[in-house]
Amino acid sequence: MTTEEYKKAADFWKIKECEEMPVEQLKPVVEEFLCNNAVCALATGTGDYVRCTPLEYSFHDGQFWIFTEGGEKFIGLEKNKNVSLAVFEKNPDFGALRSVQVMGTAKLIEPMSEEYIAHAEYKKIPVAALQKLADQGNPMHLLCITPIRMDVLFSDFKKQGYDSRQKLDFTQE
C-alpha cells in the first residue's frame, strides 16, 4: 500500500457518514456493558515495543481499575502513560457484536494509599493480604485508566436507527 492508501484506510471511520446516537442515550448503555464485563485486553507501548495483555478490570466512577502483579506491560507504562484497551463479547452471534475500544491514560495508584485501599474494598480483596504482599516487596500494583475516547461497536444500534459504530469523546466534557 502507498502512504495515501494507508491514510485513506486509517481515516475510513472519520470520513464515513454516521447516524449518531445522542450521548445521553449512548453513555449509559456503554457503562452498563463495561460494568457487566470483567476482562479487557490492555495495550501498552513505547518506541517499537508493544504489549497487549488480557486482564481483569472493574469499571466505576468513569474509570477502569486493574490490579496486577506486574509483567511486561510495565515496559511501556514506564515511558508512555497512553494506553488502549478493548472489551468485547466472547462469542457473539452474527449481527450481535458488542465491543468497546478505549484510548486513555494510565496512572499507578500508590500501594496502601486511601485510593488503593478503597478499590481493594470495592473488589472485596482483603487489605491485610495486600499489605503482606507489599511487606514482602511484591505489591499488587493498581492501574487506574481514565478514558479519553471510546469507540463503540454494537450491532444492535442499527435496530434503533443509529450506526453500529459510535464514539464517546471525553475531551469534550
Image (spheres, rainbow, N blue to C red):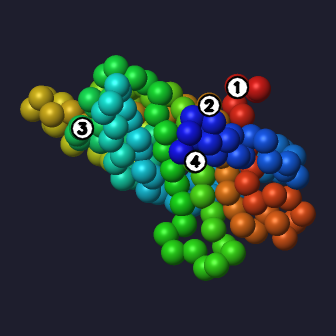
For residue 118, above or below residue 87: above
The one nearer the camera, 90 or 56, is 90
Secondary structure under tag 1 reads: loop
Which numbered disc flags the more N-terminal residue, 3 or 4? 3
How far apart are labels 4 and 1 at the CA level? 16 Å
The one nearer the camera, 113 or 43, is 43
Q: Are marks 2 and 1 in contact (CB under 8 Å)?
A: yes
- Give the image quarter of residue 158: bottom right
How far apart are labels 3 and 2 at the CA level? 23 Å
Q: Tell me which amino acid carries mark 1.
A: Thr
Which numbered disc flags the more N-terminal residue, 1 or 3? 3
Tell me if mark 4 has few (under 14), some (14-19) or many (20+) residues whose alpha carbon lies within 10 angstroms of its own.
many
Residue bearing the label numbered 4: 101
Residue 166 in view, yes or no: yes
Q: Tell me which amino acid carries mark 2.
A: Ile
Residue 48 location in percent, x, y? 33, 30
Which numbered dot is residue 171? 1
Please give left or right for residue 140 compared with residue 96 in the image: left
Which numbered disc flags the more N-terminal residue, 4 or 2? 4
Tell me if mark 2 has few (under 14), some (14-19) or many (20+) residues whose alpha carbon lies within 10 angstroms of its own.
some
- Residue drawn at (30%, 37%) of the image: 73
